[in-house]
Amino acid sequence: MFPPVEELILLKGVCRGGPVAAFLAAVRGDDAEKYAEAYAALLETGSQRQFARHIADAVRREDSLFARQSFRGAPDADVRAAFCRDLGILRQVADLADDLPPRLRALTEKGFPAIGRGEDDPLLGSGGADAAEHFYRENGYGIFLGSKAFTFEGGSLVPVRNTASVLPEDLKDYEEEKNAVEENIVNFIEGLPYADMLLYGDKGTGKSSTVHAMLNRYAPRGLRAVELPKDRIMDIDALKEALAPLPFKFLIFIDDLSLEEEDEKVSFLKASLEGSMHETSDNVMIAATSNRRHILKEKFSDRDNSVHASDTMAEQLSLSDRFGLTVLFSSTGKAAYLSIVRQLAEDRKLGIREEELYALAERWALAKGGRSPRRARQFVDYAYACKVKDIPVRF
């Protein structure tokens, strides 16, 4: 008997497109071409002999009401009942791999590669709903499964597959700055009062890396990030509305922020930081970085009239002052630079004598245009590559 897939309530997406849809079409029509299509698609994921597990993995990735409620706490009884019924139907779909119609059975008996049902997966067993609930609570669901960073395209979140793997302990020194950012993020995650934050300072001092590191540390606790380019700030209210119903905590990350005073994006950002009807979402924090304390660029004409100088300064500060937390990442002096180099070299186990290490690091800074944590990491990475290749550190 063909499974009643049209009766799926919460998990219809599992059977829409991809290998499962092709397989169902093949079995329903006893269609060799569709069966070959399904087999080819399963080969891509290495699940041609584990069809049941492929279906279970598709359930895990599905953005269903059961998944969202599980992440928040516990699904209600009706949602659980619907989910259990859907799992039963999908179990029947998996069983079809061992119960092919005549032409397909004959095809496989003649040597055509057969789709194997494979071992049972806990999600398709008797305790499938419990297993799924635990999984969603621990790992998230849908596009949030395995993705912690996103962009906002066409009104939808798009996962960023390759993100920096840096952790706070990988960033050397700047302990007070990192602690201020981390404390604010912990407050945000735990539902305590928090502030939108601006990290500012010279290039290469670790502002963006600190945001990435905190995302990596707290992603297991439900923290996610959406990067919004500064030229798309006018999308910020639409983004906040899209994020508001989701059961995660989101950083809206605006990197390298600087604007012209007459730019209409200034008013959008000001309103979003304070004073807008859109500001009340408790699962969104704006985190911006800038190379300047005054996000609004100063012009020489601003200085021409001393009568208006204070008004000009007040206007230039009015945007940055709306961030409840501002953290300065100051420029790196020689002692701080060499301290960072030493710690990174210890992590890499470079084994270079301290005097030689410091001399090389100073030459690197001179050649590359100055000292900063970024320059320190670039130097140590280069020195490590030289060590692996067993060649002198030369540049």
Image (spheres, rainbow, N blue to C red):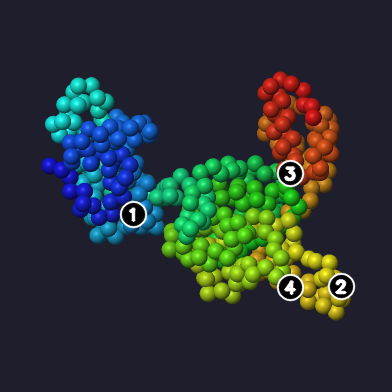
How much space separates mark 3 and mark 4, taking CA atoms?
A: 32 Å
The earlier-in-sequence mark between 3 and 4 is 4
How much space separates mark 1 and mark 4, taking CA atoms?
A: 47 Å
The earlier-in-sequence mark between 1 and 4 is 1
Q: SS at mark 1?
A: loop
How much space separates mark 2 and mark 3, taking CA atoms?
A: 37 Å
Q: Residue at x 73, y 47 (%)?
A: 204
Q: Position of residue 193 (x, y in %)?
A: 56, 66
Say which residue label 2 marks: 304
Q: State yes or no: discs 2 and 3 in contact (Cβ < 8 Å).
A: no
Say which residue label 1 marks: 64
The earlier-in-sequence mark between 1 and 3 is 1
Q: SS at mark 4?
A: helix
Which image quadrant: the N terminus? top left
Q: Residue at x 38, y 33 (%)?
A: 44
| Closer to the eye: label 1 or 3 | 1
How much space separates mark 2 and mark 4, taking CA atoms?
A: 16 Å
Q: Position of residue 138 (x, y in %)?
A: 41, 48
Q: How many marks?
A: 4
Q: Quadrant of residue 200?
A: bottom right
Say which residue label 4 marks: 315
Q: Residue at x 74, y 21 (%)?
A: 391
Q: Mark 4: which amino acid?
A: Glu
Disc sitting over residue 373 in the figure: 3
Disc 4 residue crowd, few under 14, some 14–19, many 20+, Cα 10 Å: some
